[in-house]
């Protein structure tokens, strides 16, 4: 029996140096690349099984939202889901992630866009942490209204979980959208229903 497949486009966003490439490469290839060229953008394909179904993910490892220039609106419109990464060692990157999230919501003109907020480099917890886990969870829960987790690309902590969660978010949003289309409700009626939690 052939299984239904779904092809989802996912963009990994966040300021430079937070570990977007390290997370993507760790997820796709199972290795930690410690010196990835920060200017390189690339796309990767990977199959992932989530809740008994197979998904083909097109993952776009961006070089930062400011590098997208004129293409930004198009990319933001075409993606199914967004992995928004900051580093727990950088307050600025935490602020950037929040700003990017608001840009996405503005461009999509709806607030139920599938997004996962990720505080990477949690292996540096003792030495270099400046953003608390609580602060990440609070912003995700009360402001961005999206799921949140901390991760370590280096030690492969919560790496696969990020992509499982974004697939679930995309699926959830599809169900909500389909229901609204069926019932004829207007676009502005949509509301993000996901509950935030720490994976
Ligand atoms: P990008 O610019 O967001 O793509 O960031 P990179 O993936 O190139 O990573 C930037 C730097 O952070 C590199 O030196 C990586 O080795 C390091 N890095 C990335 N992820 C982690 C992590 O989980 N833990 C630690 N300790 N370092 C990381
Ligand atoms: Mg990179």
Image (cartoon, helix red, strand yellow):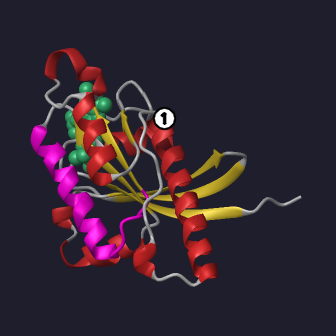
Residue 154 at x, y = what percent? 35, 28
Q: To which quarter of the image does residue 2 belong?
A: bottom right
Residue 3 at x, y = what percent? 79, 59
Asked if residue 10 is positioned above or below residue 27 in the image, the reply reads: below
Asked if residue 71 is positioned above or below residue 17 in the image, the reply reads: below
Q: 62 or 145, which is in the foreground?
A: 145
The quarter of the rendered structure image containing the N terminus is: bottom right
Is residue 127 in sight in this rendering? yes
Identify which residue is drawn at 63% across, 56% down.
Answer: 55
Q: To which quarter of the image does residue 39 belong?
A: bottom left
Q: Determine the secondary structure under disc 1.
A: loop
Q: Main secondary structure of the magenta part?
A: helix
Q: 29 or 93, which is in the foreground?
A: 93
Q: To which quarter of the image does residue 129 belong?
A: top left
Q: Which residues are magenta?
A: 91-114
Residue 163 at x, y = what percent? 49, 46
Residue 164 at x, y = what percent? 54, 45
Q: Is residue 194 magenta?
A: no
Q: Is residue 107 magenta?
A: yes
Alpha-carbon neighbours of circle 1 within 10 Å: few (<14), some, or many (≥20)?
Answer: some
Q: 157 or 44, which is in the foreground?
A: 157
Q: Is residue 95 left or right of residue 82?
A: left
Is residue 75 in sight in this rendering? no
Q: Residue furthest right?
A: 1
Q: Which residue is mark 1?
A: 30
Identify which residue is drawn at 41% across, 33% down.
Answer: 198
Identify which residue is drawn at 68% across, 45% down.
Answer: 51
Identify which residue is drawn at 51% across, 54% down.
Answer: 169
């Amino acid at each position: 029996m052939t299984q239904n497949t779904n092809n989802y486009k996912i963009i990994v966003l966040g300021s430079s140096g937070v570990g977007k490439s390290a997370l993507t490469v760790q997820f796709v290839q199972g290795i930690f690349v410690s010196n990835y060229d920060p200017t390189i953008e690339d796309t990767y394909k990977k199959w992932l099984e989530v809740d008994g179904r197979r998904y083909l993910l097109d993952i776009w490892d961006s070089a930062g939202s400011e590098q997208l220039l004129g293409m930004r609106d198009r990319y933001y419109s075409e993606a199914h889901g967004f992995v928004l990464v900051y580093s727990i060692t950088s307050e600025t990157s935490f602020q950037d992630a929040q700003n990017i999230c608001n840009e996405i919501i503005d461009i999509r003109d709806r607030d139920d866009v599938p997004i996962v907020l990720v505080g990477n480099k949690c292996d540096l917890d003792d030495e270099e942490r400046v953003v608390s886990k609580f602060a990440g969870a609070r912003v995700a829960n009360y402001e961005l209204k999206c799921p949140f987790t901390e991760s370590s690309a280096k030690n492969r902590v919560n790496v696969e979980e990020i992509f499982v969660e974004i697939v679930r978010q995309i699926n959830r949003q599809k169900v909500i959208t389909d229901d609204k289309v069926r019932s004829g409700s207007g676009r502005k009626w949509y509301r993000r229903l996901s509950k935030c939690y720490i994976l």
